[in-house]
Amino acid sequence: MLSILGLDEPTERVYHELVLTGPASVEALALRLGLAREAVAGSVEILEAKSLANRNPVGLVQTAPPQLALGALLTAQRHALGQAELTAAALDEAYHAASAQNAHDLVQIVVGAEQVMQRLEHLQLNAETELLALVQAQVEIPATCEGEAESLAIQRGVSYRVVIERAGLNGPTSANALSSAVPVGEQLRVIDVLPTKMVIADRCTVMLPLSLPGSADPDPAGSHPPASTQRADDGPVALISRAPALVNAMIGLFESIWQRALPVRKDGEEALVVDEPGIALPTALDLRILSLLLVGATDAAIAKQLGLGLRTVQRRVAHMMELAEVSTRLQLGWQARERGWLK
């Protein structure tokens, strides 16, 4: 029971024997307790070190009053426990402070056009292998490539893969500007609609826009690739994160979009050409059927309204699902919107 005070089992037995029978020699204690003399001598040394026993004038081992001796030890133990609690509290506070700092390092918020553009430039300058970007059509394409960091990164061997919304290619001005802004070594693809702007560097850092309450429409970034931002009262706001879960999710999003996007190349006159696949589009009848499906009409109701057979309606829906490369009607509705089939 006294192990908390540093007494092992043999020493505690020796102490109990001295308290119960009074002063005794080491030999007598060893005989009464059935212990080796060396073990008892060691226990007596421990008791003496803790001021629980001493030698009387004739050399016998005796104890001090237990309440006095043990009380002093318990008081010292309580003080040590109090100090340990204070140390534990200080360490806990330091741990949470370090955790908060680590969380800050993993996710940062950047506010203001200058700060956002500076961080975008840093992403490119520090990139070692790859930079991925999604570019929405609202972003203004400059007449010349102002991204010196991008050119330097490509010279170092950094590969660029960029997906831009199709609306960014509309009109001769936008197309010509984009053509002059695309450096050699960059792979460019186009898609009808992008869900967000995004930049990913070396598959370990992602830059995303933040939609804040009361924020206005996205502001043109004015460089290529553009910063992923939306404008708040203090200017564009971007989130920069190194959190692996978020980065991996955004890489998955980019790769899925990249697979569906169409390659863009330069022809002999440096104009941009989209490699459109020879894929059939839904007919006007297909789109009428799809419109009715999306408002909740059943196949039978659509057949009756359009004067078609039920099998014809079902066959046309299956054809559209094949065109959209989906397996459910819910997915068909989503892909119809993404592909611009329904205006």
Image (cartoon, rainbow, N blue to C red):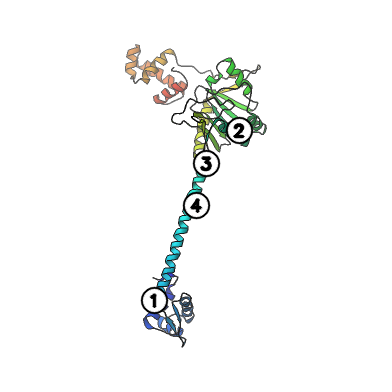
Q: Amino acid at mark 3?
A: Leu
Q: CA distance from mark 2 to mark 4?
A: 34 Å
| Horizontal and vertical percent position of residue 302 | 34, 16
Name the residue that disc number 4 marks.
94
Q: Are marks 1 and 4 in contact (CB under 8 Å)?
A: no
Name the residue that disc number 3 marks.
106
Q: Using the image, tell me which numbered label, if any, was put on residue 66.
A: 1
Can you say whether 204 is above or below 24 in the image?
Answer: above
Q: In the picture provided, is 153 more to the left or to the right than 107?
A: right
The residue at the far top in this view is 307
Q: CA distance from mark 3 to mark 4?
A: 18 Å
Query: Which numbered disc flags the more N-terminal residue, 3 or 4?
Result: 4
For the residue carrying disc 4, how many other residues have a C-alpha within 10 Å: few (<14), some (14-19), or many (20+)?
few
Name the residue that disc number 2 marks.
121
| Horizontal and vertical percent position of residue 310 | 34, 16
Q: Secondary structure at mark 3?
A: helix
* Pick the front one: 331 or 206: 206
**Closer to the eye: label 2 or 4:** 4
Q: Are marks 1 and 3 in contact (CB under 8 Å)?
A: no
Q: Using the image, tell me which numbered label, if any, was put on residue 11.
A: none
Q: Secondary structure at mark 4?
A: helix
